[in-house]
Image: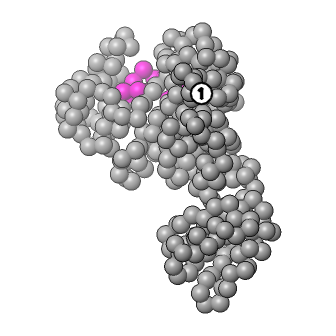
Amino acid sequence: MPDQLVIDVTALNKSYGDKHVVRDFSLKVQRGEIFGFLGPNGSGKTTSIRLICGLLKADSGSGTVMGFDVLKQSAAIKREVGYMTQRFSLWEDLTIRENLDFVARMYGMPDRVTHVADALEKLGLSSRQNQLAGSLSGGWKQRLSLAACMLHRPRLLLLDEPTAGVDPKARRDFWDEIHRLAGAGVTILVTTHYMDEAERCTRLGYIAYGRLLTTGTIQEVIAHQHLATWIVRGPELAVLAEKLRLLPGVSQVTAFGNTLHVTGPDAQKLAESLRTLDPGERYHLEEAATALEDVFIHLMGQAEDNFQ
C-alpha cells in the first residue's frame, strides 16, 4: 500500500558512556518517500541510521522497520535494507564486476550473474565493469556503491551523505536515480548537507546534538519556525552584519554572496529595527520569504550541545 509505514520508531535512545548520542528519536516514513535527514556534523545522524537498520541496538525505545521489531529482529531488518556509508567501503583492488559479484555471494543470491549484469546495466557501469574500483573517480565510486547496496533489491535504502565530495553533474545523476527508485516503491532515507538536495526530498527532518527538532515537508519545516526574513544589500557588509546583530528582534545575520539575510521570530520588531538603518542610497532593504537554509541555521543556533 502506498501509505504503508516502512519506518515507525518511537523514543529510541543510544548512549556511549555519559554521552547521550541519540535522545528520544521518533520517526515515521512511508513507502516510496525520500526522507531527507539533515543536521550538523556529530549531531547523531549516522547513529540514528544505524539504529534503524539494525547495525546498532537502541538502549531503549520501540518500533518497527518494514514490519520487523527494531530491537528484536535486527537480522531480518538488515536483509531488507541497503546501506550506503559515508566513505567508499568496497574493495579497491577488485574490478567493478568483481565487487558486485562478491557482494552477491555474501547475500547468497541465486543466479548472481544475472543480478550483477542487471545492476551494471541499470547504473550505467557496464562499459567500466573491468576497471579497478580504486581507479574510479568519486562519482563513479558513488555509482558503484549504490549498485552494491541495491543488488539484493532492498525495500529500504539508507544513504549516509552519499554525494559528499562529488561534482555537480554526478550529484544530479545520482538524484535522478534516487527519484527513479522511489518511483518504483523503494523507501529512501538520505543524510545530506546540501540544501538543493534537501529540496528534492519528499519530507525532511533536522537533528542536532542527538535530538530530532522538526520534521515535515519543506513548507511545513519553514512555517513551523515562524521566522521573518529581510535581505539587506549595501557596502561593507561585514561591518554592517556586526551592527545588525545588536538590534532588537534580530536572531541571526548570515552572509549570502553580496547580501545579508537577517531573520528573527518577531516580524514587527525585526522590521522596526531594520528601519532604524539609514537606507537612502547606502542600504537596500527587502522583505523576503524565509529560505530552508535560514531555518536550519536558526535551528542549529537554538540547539543545546549534548557533549557539553
- In percent of width and height, residue 296 lies at 61, 51
Residue 199 percent location from the top left of the image: 57, 51
Whether residue 20 is visible, yes or no, is: yes
Q: Residue at x 50, y 37 (%)?
A: 42
Q: Decide if residue 280 is on the left or right side of residue 108.
A: right
Near mark 1 (Cα within 10 A), the count class, few <14, some 14-19 or many ≥20, is some
Amino acid found under the numbered disc labelled 1: His
Q: Nearer the viewer, residue 195 or 251?
A: 251
Q: Quadrant where the C terminus lies?
A: top right
For the N terminus, give its image quadrant: top right
Does the magenta run of residues contain 4? no
Tell me if residue 225 comes above or below residue 282 in the rendering.
Answer: above
Q: Is residue 185 visible?
A: no
Secondary structure type for disc 1: strand
Q: Position of residue 209 (x, y in %)?
A: 59, 37
Residue depicted at x 74% and y 65%: 249
Q: Which residues are magenta?
A: 147-157
Q: Residue furthest front?
A: 308
Which residue lies under the disc numbered 1?
20
Q: Position of residue 9 (x, y in %)?
A: 66, 23
Q: Residue at x 36, y 34 (%)?
A: 87
Tally of numbered tags: 1
* Residue in front for this viewpoint, 62 or 3: 62
Q: Farthest bottom residue?
A: 281
Q: Is residue 128 above or below residue 225?
A: above
| Viewer-proximal residue among 1 and 262 | 262
Q: Tell me where residue 231 sits by quadrant.
A: bottom right
178 with respect to 221 (left or right): left
184 lies above or below 244: above
Using residue 99 as the reference point, say whether residue 210 is left or right of it.
right
